[in-house]
């Protein structure tokens, strides 16, 4: 699979929230999408899944321009976790994934469902008869990740998939994604740059709607601070000034 974004721009009324994004990637690449709150990351994910249409520019998947026409066959090639997954919480985890398998018309999904849940939910045996409504936030998030991977998508779009996960769960999800990476093209966003560093082959830094960096992880690290979060601060805030917070403890009212 090859995906090209050509001068992708999105505005809401007079406000441009993503400007002139161009890149080209293919199967095996994992793009870490980073940037501060409100930078335009989720907007990019929503454009990629066709929830939003670009104001200008193009999304080209294997030579086909997507937009008003976004064939169901193309959607079936995508696995997406965006704006937090919405699960059917009356179901158990297994029942929910069987429901997803039916939507994708997957024959004999049971072994894959068992493997995914067995890997992601360390307490699977204890919770397998519980409804999702009784799951914790992190457990639901892991079921949502499993649902994305069930139909073996070629394009995996994960907007903050590690939100709410403890360090052990995050490691399990990252291991799964790293193992799956060679057979998909992945876009993943996270505010935890250690996670991005662990999984991404490429980095896209967006700030105030603009692309501040696009390239391989190695290119990003070259000549910058060794710790990724420091390197990002260096890129976005070359002259960080300390905020005066004395008002927090000293102000009378
Ligand atoms: N439907 C909308 N209508 C108007 N403005 C929007 C809409 N969706 C997003 N925005 C604006 O677009 C900008 C980018 O938002 P977006 O959600 O893409 O940021 P983000 O990088 O994902 O932020 P965060 O890290 O906080 O999740 C923000 O200023 C936001 O207010």
Image (cartoon, rainbow, N blue to C red):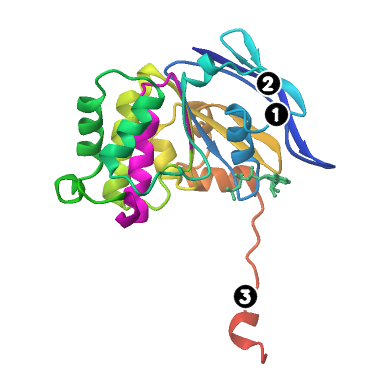
Mark nearest the camera among 3 and 1 is 1
The residue segment tinted magenta is 132-158
> Which residue lies most toward the top here?
63
Residue designated by label 2? 67
- Whether 37 is drawn above or below 203: the answer is below
Pointer 3 or 1: first along the chain: 1
| Distance Cα–Cα, label 3 vs label 1 | 42 Å
Residue 53: give its label: 1
Residue designated by label 3? 245
Counting every numbered tag in the picture gives 3
- Magenta-span inclusion, residue 133: yes
- Magenta-span inclusion, residue 90: no
Residue 51 image position (x, y, % from top left):
62, 33
Residue ID at (28%, 38%): 95
Secondary structure under badge 1?
A: loop
Whether label 3 lies within 8 Å of ligand 1 gets the answer no
148 left or right, relative to 251: left
Pointer 3 or 2: first along the chain: 2
Query: Residues at badges 2 and 1 in contact (C-beta under 8 Å)?
Result: yes
- Whether 129 is drawn above or below 77: the answer is below
């Amino acid at each position: 699979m090859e995906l090209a974004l050509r001068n992708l721009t999105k505005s809401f009324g007079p406000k441009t929230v993503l400007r002139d994004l161009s890149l080209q990637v293919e199967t095996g690449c994992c793009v870490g999408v980073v940037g501060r709150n409100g930078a335009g990351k989720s907007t990019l994910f929503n454009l990629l899944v066709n929830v939003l249409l670009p104001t200008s520019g193009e999304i080209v998947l294997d030579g086909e321009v997507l937009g008003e026409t976004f064939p169901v066959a193309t959607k079936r090639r995508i696995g997406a976790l965006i704006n937090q997954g919405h699960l059917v919480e009356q179901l158990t985890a297994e029942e929910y994934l069987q429901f997803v398998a039916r939507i994708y018309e997957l024959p004999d999904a049971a072994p894959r469902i068992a493997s995914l849940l067995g890997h992601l939910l360390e307490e699977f045996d204890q919770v397998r008869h519980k409804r999702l409504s009784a799951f914790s936030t992190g457990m639901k998030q892991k079921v949502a990740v499993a649902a994305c991977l069930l139909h073996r998508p070629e394009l995996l779009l994960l907007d903050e998939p590690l939100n709410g996960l403890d360090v052990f769960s995050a490691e399990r999800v990252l291991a799964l994604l790293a193992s799956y990476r060679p057979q998909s093209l992945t876009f993943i966003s996270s505010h935890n740059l250690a996670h991005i560093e662990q999984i991404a082959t490429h980095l896209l830094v967006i700030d105030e709607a603009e692309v501040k960096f696009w390239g391989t992880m190695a290119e990003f690290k070259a000549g910058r601070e060794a710790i990724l979060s420091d390197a990002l601060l260096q890129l976005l805030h070359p002259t960080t000034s300390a905020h005066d917070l004395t008002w927090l403890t000293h102000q009378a009212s």
